[in-house]
Image (spheres, rainbow, N blue to C red):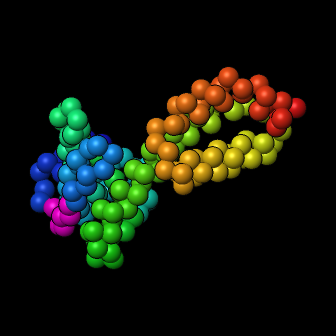
């Protein structure tokens, strides 16, 4: 991590990209800086990984209702060389990764997917598919912020779901 920070703070980016989004009551300005990354400066365990590119993404957000501001820098690594792809493609890939992480947060924290315990081998997989289907149905209906309510209902009736699937 320190090498990523050092690279971003001290070297000139080979490529840059940016985006400005206004969604979900927030204004987000994202700036991507792409660097050729030398793994020789990392621990030995990383030297055979094929890492070639560092992507530093600076995000500045403003919550429009409250005018609350936040900023952060996230670092991503890629096995692609900057000559093999465009910086814009890698920058967009980091955005897609964030969407996956946000979805995992909803699944794990809000809906408690990681807490599902069952002795039958394939039931957790079935439950994961069911949770994914439920999330997609909610999104299709364009219902917002109902995941907490859904989770509370599932917690109250979890024993019924466990009886159906795990006994």
The answer to whether residue 96 shows anywhere in this view is yes
**Image quadrant occupied by the N terminus:** top left
Q: Where is residue 106 in the image (x, y as percent from the top left)?
A: 51, 39
Q: In the picture provided, is 162 more to the left or to the right than 57?
A: right
Looking at the image, which residue sits at the far bottom? 84
Residue 16: in magenta span: yes
Which residue sits at x=59%, y=31%?
Answer: 151
Q: Nearer the viewer, residue 63 or 103?
A: 63
Could you tell me which residue is drawn at 54 percent across and 51 percent down?
141
Nearer the observer, 162 or 147: 147
Q: Can residue 35 be seen here? A: no
Residue range in magenta is 13-18
Name the residue: 59% across, 34% down. Answer: 150
Please tell me whether residue 35 is drawn above or below residue 27 in the rendered image: below
Query: Does the stretch in magenta take in 59?
Result: no
> Could you say where residue 166 lies in the image, as x and y percent from the top left?
83, 34
The front one of 102 and 82 is: 102
Residue at 45% x, 46% y: name it: 101
For residue 124, which quarter of the picture?
Answer: top right
**Furthest residue toward top:** 156
| 134 relative to 83 in the view: left or right | right
Main secondary structure along the magenta-highlighted residues: strand
Locate residue 114: give its quadrant.
top right
Given the current orientation, which residue lies at the most extreme right position? 167
The location of residue 167, given as percent across then percent down, is 88, 32
In the image, residue 163 lies at what x, y percent?
A: 83, 30
User: Is 44 placed above or below 64 here?
Assistant: below
């Amino acid at each position: 991590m320190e090498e990523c920070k050092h690279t971003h703070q001290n070297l000139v980016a080979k490529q840059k990209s940016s985006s400005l989004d206004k969604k979900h009551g927030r204004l987000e300005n994202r700036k991507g800086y792409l660097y050729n990354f030398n793994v020789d400066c990392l621990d030995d365990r990383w030297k055979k990984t094929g890492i070639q590119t560092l992507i530093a993404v600076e995000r500045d957000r403003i919550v429009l209702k409250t005018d609350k501001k936040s900023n952060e820098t996230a670092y991503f690594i890629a096995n692609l060389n900057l000559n093999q792809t465009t910086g814009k493609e890698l920058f967009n890939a980091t955005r897609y990764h964030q969407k996956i992480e946000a979805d995992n947060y909803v699944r794990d924290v809000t809906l408690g997917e990681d807490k599902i315990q069952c002795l039958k081998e394939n039931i957790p997989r079935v439950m994961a598919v069911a949770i994914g289907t439920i999330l997609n149905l909610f999104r299709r209906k364009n219902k917002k912020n109902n995941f907490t309510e859904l989770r509370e209902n599932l917690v109250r009736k979890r024993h019924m779901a466990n009886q159906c699937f795990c006994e």
